[in-house]
Image (tube, grey):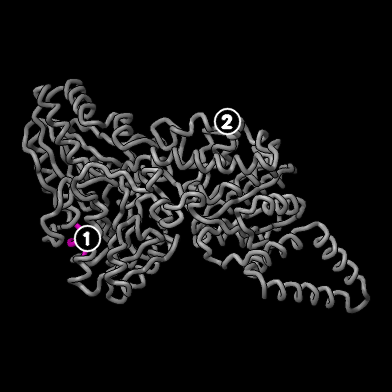
């Protein structure tokens, strides 16, 4: 097996041309077999096998720097940099990350996970190289829609201005810029990337510029003719205008062409954009037919391509959100849905089908999603902005500047709130309660179960201001009785278990974790009261005063960072209410980066399993003197 001999990129460089083809087949087989068991990003990785081989045949990592945008296309890179022996642990607790990770390998030059960032990061590395008078290549590989994010164009614009050596590889796996026109483009690229063509271009321009009087005019004319003629037959004029030399489109599965082009491009100076056409899911027919489902795939049967079904159970929070959004749109024609390239992920497929004129997918542009929602809201429309918690961080300024200052009725439905799991550090939704509660006019809530989610969404529709509802990536407790619900009073909390001495104030699905902890506390002779606070902002102050007055010990539980989160909000409100100090224990996510693993494994690591929560509360009560 050729792949077993690859301990570093140096081993790739010494393979024969025939062995490289074998390596490509083995990479695909290994990725398919592994992801079928672990789940993960399959289709995008199958599409970049030849590209990854060509990169490591041409460039010298870790000296040369490769930044993989999003990181969902870095599995072949991991295997080519000596991680075969651990590849079966990918996305597993304490195993390999599903994204590039600087702690994992010296060949991972930057940990990515959010889209459209690679160009700016690679440009920063190139600028540092120039400042340090060093000599290495800086390469950004961007694909999977990454070029639809505005920050990518900010990077392109600045790179063109600086004019430094930078290679941007546009991995176009959806033919979003232009179709692959085959031999013509391959032939054109062989010419335009070759040393002879660039030598002639340079020397001709130099010679013409020396002609008296008309030299400068002639030079501009020649460059303009070249620009126009190239623009007629290639889609690269936009990139040329931004200051890049453009090569492509290239067949991203023609290894000979890629190797030849990389060797030529390596000799050129300045910013270069190489446009590569790849097929998402290449080499595995089910993934080619359905690249969306196999983008972030669940475990599946390799022979049939059928996904392995889990135990039948209640719907996910995402499904309940989606059904409620449809119910709201059916009853109120003002309701529209906005998402940022996450129609499937946020569950809005049915909404888009039923209400196509009221559905807006803005591509990977969360900032624009909120700007669009703000504009819609000014004209009497009621937008639902469905965005993953971690991705909303990218639009914090728009949230404050465009939504909150104007106090607009935009409903933020934040999927993947709290511990996300296998996608790891870049995708954990651990900060939304903290960054949302500091914003004026913002109502911040979290659903404990399906009933809460339905009613909170209808509460938001009846509210004339910004409203956030947060929910996790997991199953609900049951199927809702209805997808219509009576609005809550803003801030309303509920006692879900009556006890004495100890009161546990929980937010979101931590309510059910607290209820299970209460069963463990019975063993210690502790009978706690459990409160579903439901709202972080505004908080139910009357309920808080009542609970504080009738209990000796207070505990807060949240799956948000402990810094500035729900527990901090409770402590702040208690101080403002001038309630005499009493023992208060805040349980939440510590102030550190949380890597990948299953939700239960991560909660266990954080000391937040029901049993561990009970033990922490028992120790807390024993350590304090009764008031």
- Residue 214 position by quadrant: bottom right
Q: Is residue 575 visible?
A: no
Q: Is residue 457 magenta?
A: yes
Q: Nearer the viewer, residue 480 or 510?
A: 480
Q: Is residue 205 magenta?
A: no
Q: Name the mark on residue 4.
A: 2
* Left or right of 197 in this view: 412: left
Screen quadrant of the N terminus: top right
Residue 157 in the image: state x and y as whole percent.
61, 62
Mark 1 sits on what residue? 323
Alpha carbon distance from label 2 to label 1: 48 Å
Residue 154 in the image: state x and y as whole percent.
57, 60
Judge depth for marks 2 and 1 and give the one in front: 2
- Residue 551 position by quadrant: top left
Q: Earlier in the sequence, mark 2 or mark 1?
A: 2
Screen quadrant of the C terminus: top left
Q: Residue at x 32, y 41 (%)?
A: 419
Q: Nearer the viewer, residue 593 or 584?
A: 593
- Residue 121 in the image: above or below residue 525: below
Q: Residue at x 23, y 27 (%)?
A: 612
Q: Name the mark on residue 355.
A: none
Q: Residue furthest front?
A: 303
Decide whether the magenta segment is chiefly helix, strand or loop: helix
Mark 1 residue element = helix
Magenta range = 456-461
Density class for disc 1 (Cα within 10 Å; few <14, some 14-19, many ≥20) is many
Q: Residue at x 51, y 52 (%)?
A: 282
């Amino acid at each position: 097996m050729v792949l077993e001999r690859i301990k570093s990129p140096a081993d790739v460089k010494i393979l024969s041309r025939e062995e490289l083809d074998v390596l490509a087949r083995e990479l695909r087989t290994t990725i398919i077999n592994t992801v079928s068991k672990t789940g993960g990003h399959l289709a995008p990785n199958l599409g970049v096998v030849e590209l990854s081989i060509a990169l490591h045949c041409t460039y010298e990592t870790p000296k040369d720097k490769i930044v993989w945008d999003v990181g969902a296309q870095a599995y072949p890179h991991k295997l080519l940099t000596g991680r075969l022996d651990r590849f079966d642990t990918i996305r597993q607790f304490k195993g390999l990350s599903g994204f590039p990770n600087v702690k994992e390998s010296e060949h991972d030059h930057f940990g990515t996970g959010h889209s459209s960032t690679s160009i700016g990061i690679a440009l920063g590395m190139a600028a540092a190289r120039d400042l340090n008078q060093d000599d290495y290549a800086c390469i950004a590989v961007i694909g999977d829609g990454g070029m639809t994010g505005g920050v990518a164009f900010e990077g392109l614009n600045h790179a063109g201005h600086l004019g430094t050596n930078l290679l941007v590889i546009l991995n176009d796996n959806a033919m979003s810029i232009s179709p692959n026109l085959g031999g013509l483009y391959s032939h054109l690229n062989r010419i335009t990337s070759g040393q002879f063509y660039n030598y002639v271009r340079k020397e001709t321009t130099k010679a013409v510029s020396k002609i008296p009087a008309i030299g400068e005019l002639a030079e501009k004319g020649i460059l303009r003719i070249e620009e126009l003629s190239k623009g007629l037959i290639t889609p690269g004029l936009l990139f040329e205008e931004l200051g890049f030399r453009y090569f492509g489109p290239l067949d991203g599965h023609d290894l000979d062409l890629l190797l030849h082009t990389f060797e030529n491009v390596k000799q050129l100076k300045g910013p270069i954009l190489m446009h590569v056409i790849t097929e998402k899911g290449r080499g595995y027919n089910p993934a080619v037919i359905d690249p969306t489902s196999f983008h972030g795939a669940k475990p599946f049967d390799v022979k049939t391509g059928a996904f392995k079904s889990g135990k039948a159970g209640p719907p996910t929070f995402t499904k309940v959100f989606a059904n409620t959004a449809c119910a709201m749109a059916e009853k109120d024609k003002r309701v529209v849905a906005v998402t940022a390239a996450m129609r499937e992920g946020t569950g809005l497929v049915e909404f888009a089908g039923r209400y196509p004129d009221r559905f807006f997918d803005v591509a990977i542009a969360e900032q624009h999603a909120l700007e669009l929602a703000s504009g819609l809201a000014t004209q009497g429309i009621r937008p639902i902005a469905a965005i993953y918690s971690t991705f909303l961080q990218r639009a914090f300024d728009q949230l404050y500047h465009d939504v909150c200052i104007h106090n607009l009725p935009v409903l933020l439905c934040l999927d993947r709130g709290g511990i996300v799991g296998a996608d790891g550090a870049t995708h954990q939704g651990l900060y939304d309660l903290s960054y949302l509660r500091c914003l004026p006019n913002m109502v911040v809530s979290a659903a404990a179960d399906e009933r809460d989610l339905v009613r909170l969404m209808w509460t938001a529709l009846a509210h004339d201001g910004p409203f956030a509802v947060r929910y996790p990536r997991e199953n609900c407790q049951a199927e809702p009785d209805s997808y219509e619900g009576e609005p809550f009073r803003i801030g309303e909390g509920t006692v879900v278990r009556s006890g004495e001495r100890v009161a546990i104030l929980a937010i979101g699905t931590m309510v059910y974790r607290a209820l299970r902890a209460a069963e463990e506390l019975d063993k210690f002779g502790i009978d706690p009261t459990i409160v579903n606070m439901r709202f972080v902002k505004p908080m139910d102050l009357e309920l808080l005063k009542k609970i504080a007055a009738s209990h000796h010990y207070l505990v807060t539980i949240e799956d948000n960072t402990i810094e500035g989160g729900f527990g901090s909000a409770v402590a702040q409100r208690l101080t403002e209410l001038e309630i005499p100090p009493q023992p208060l224990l805040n349980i939440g996510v510590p102030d550190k980066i949380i890597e990948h693993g299953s939700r239960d494994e991560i909660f266990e690591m954080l000391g937040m399993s029901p049993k561990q929560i009970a033990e922490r509360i028992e120790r807390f009560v024993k350590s304090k003197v009764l008031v």
